[in-house]
Amino acid sequence: MARNEEKAQSMLNRFITLKQEEKKKPKERRPFLASECRDLAEADRWRQQIMREIGRKVAEIQNEGLGEHRLRDLNDEINKLIREKGHWERRIIELGGPNYTKHGAKMTDLEGNIVDVPNPSGRGPGYRYFGAAKKLPGVRELFEKPPELKKRRSRYDIFKRIDASYYGYRDDEDGILEKVEGPAELEMRERALKEWERLEEIKREAKKAVKSGEVASATSILYEEEEDVVAEERRVQEMEGKMEEEFVVHVPLPDEKEIEKMVVEKKKMELLSKYTSEDLLQEQLEAKAMLNVQR
């Protein structure tokens, strides 16, 4: 009895399902070209449908156990849907709808990273990798950062680091220079003090000499050092004068006429050597010497 009721119930369920499917409208397919759509609401609906498909496939591509071929196919399908979404967004703008490309969120993977990497396989600069597809052979290298090259410092960077310490203005701040300058400063002070005391003694003697009438001796004492300096300067000037004396030529130099005569004689000899033999030249020279001919 129970078996017959179950059969009747299953037949009733199938009948109800068929009736419901008959009442439904035939399933609409998304237009192949976005330009075929003339209704803004339909264009927005097709865009939402593409967004749902992208989200479903992006969630599926996170599974690394799907295999290399399946992952590559899924990644291609996602990129195809992204391009199609762009077509529908441009069509929505043409129909007077909102600009989703400007105000919408950027396409990201589930980890929240923007993946827009140039593909060397010729798919174009907008090809993107999602999820486990980023770990495939040949794709992993695209996400590796190249080694940072050591940047050569420019002249501006070099001079930017130069400050007062570079020129030695802060050498006394390290304490070493102060220790070295201390004894040297004391020695210079002592030397200056002795020189001052000597000059004061000379002045006192000069005053005494003036009072006693010995002006000449006092003057000689005061200007003794100045005379030595003047004598040294005079010797230096004499040496410079000797160095600046003109060089006298002891060999008589030929004038312009003699130089022209020598040039003409040289050219004559070159012409003779060109058109006559050496024996003939030798005979001519001997004949000139015998006849005492100077030309």
Image (cartoon, rainbow, N blue to C red):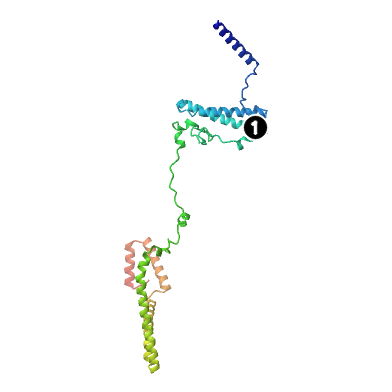
Residue at the image position 60 percent from the left and 27 percent from the top: 49
Against 152, residue 14 (above or below) is above
In the image, 290 versus 99, the foreground residue is 99
Q: Can residue 250 be seen in this view?
A: no
Q: In which quarter of the image is the N terminus?
A: top right
* Residue 190 image point, x, y percent: 35, 76
Q: What residue type is labelled 1?
A: Ile
Against 22, residue 147 (above or below) is below
Q: Residue furthest bottom?
A: 213
Q: Residue furthest top?
A: 1
In the image, 71 versus 172, the foreground residue is 172
Against 151, residue 193 (above or below) is below
Against 106, residue 258 (above or below) is below
Kindly identify which residue carries mark 1.
Answer: 92
Number of other residues with Cα within 10 Å of mark 1, as a class: few under 14, some 14 to 19, many 20 or more: many
In the image, 231 versus 130, the foreground residue is 130
* Residue 264 image point, x, y percent: 41, 68
The quadrant in which residue 79 appears is top right
The quadrant in which residue 161 appears is bottom left
Residue at the image position 38 percent from the left and 61 percent from the top: 274
Q: Can residue 87 be seen in this view?
A: yes
Give the total of numbered labels.
Answer: 1
* Residue 261 image point, x, y percent: 41, 71
Element type at marker 1? helix
Residue at the image position 63 percent from the left and 15 percent from the top: 20
Q: In which quarter of the image is the C terminus?
A: bottom left
